[in-house]
Image: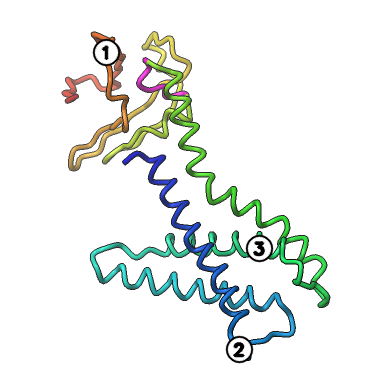
Amino acid sequence: KTRFWFELFTAGHTLVFGLCALSFVRLSLLVPGARFKYRLKYYVVALILSAFVGAVTEIIQSYVGRDGELADLYRDMLGAAAFLFVAMTFDQKLTWVFRTGRWLRHVVWALGPVLIIVIFWPAMKWGGAYLYRDRQMPALLQFDSTVMRLFTRVANGRLEVVDPPSAWSSEAGKVALLTLYPGFYPGLTMRELSPDWSLYKEIQFSLFSLRTDTLTLEF
């Protein structure tokens, strides 16, 4: 599973809670005797119920072998709020006659589309990163590119982008300074490489060690 599909699945999870929140609004309108003076309160109740369902879901997950995380609850609430704000924008029966109604209405109109973009932004970011990396083929990694560095992971170490040492005649504008710490398999990993390299016969890279003793690396 790629990072793009993970983020897209996460966005879909927030959409489920968005639909859940809209269902709560509809159900509360159908409950006999449940009448509020302001229609806005139905949306507030729906948001509270969505938060309750999200919290219960995360608690249950922690007992059935899955991770219950506050970050998931945050995404659930983000989806619920986004759908509710959009629904409020198109609700013709919703009035804003109370004291703070006018400015709150404009906030809701603005926040609805913004929250939708926030929900899908990680998936859009990674989708663009994959397209950019494909255009850089056959380069595996360019350390002076923020996008390409998204596909790296450092274990027990630190990666810094610096100017090349004066003793190293590198053509690159920037190089990576990799500092490895003692620990379990320290190193740099390039994630989600293209699976097909049948048109290429060799790999080229340059290394420069600041140490004077022999350094053994494993690829």
Amino acid under disc 3? Ala
Secondary element at tag 2: loop
Residue 31 lies in what quarter of the image? bottom right
Please give left or right for residue 178 compared with residue 161 in the image. Answer: left
Please give left or right for residue 13 compared with residue 106 in the image. Answer: left
Secondary element at tag 3: helix
Please give left or right for residue 182 compared with residue 79 in the image. Answer: left
Front tag of 3 and 1: 3
Where 63 falls versus 196 (above or below)?
below
Front tag of 1 and 2: 2
Q: Which colour scheme is used?
A: rainbow
Front tag of 2 and 3: 2
Amino acid under disc 1? Ile
The answer for how far apart the CA atoms under marks 1 and 2 are is 71 Å
Looking at the image, tell me whether mark 1 or mark 2 is earlier in sequence order.
2
Q: Which residue is drawn at 64% across and 77% down?
A: 42
Secondary element at tag 1: loop
Residue 81 lies in what quarter of the image? bottom right
Quickly name the residue at label 3: 87
Magenta stretch bounds: 138-144
Looking at the image, tell me whether mark 3 or mark 1 is earlier in sequence order.
3
The answer for how far apart the CA atoms under marks 2 and 3 are is 22 Å
Q: Residue at x 56, y 77 (%)?
A: 27
Amino acid under disc 2? Pro
Magenta stretch prevailing secondary structure? loop
Callout 1 environment at 10 Å: few (<14), some (14 to 19), or many (20+)?
Answer: few
Where in the figure is residue 164, as x and y percent of width and height? 42, 18
Quickly name the residue at label 1: 203
Does 189 appear in magenta?
no
Quadrant in which the C terminus appears: top left
Looking at the image, tell me whether mark 2 or mark 3 is earlier in sequence order.
2
Determine which of the numbered discs, if any, sits on residue 32 in the image: 2
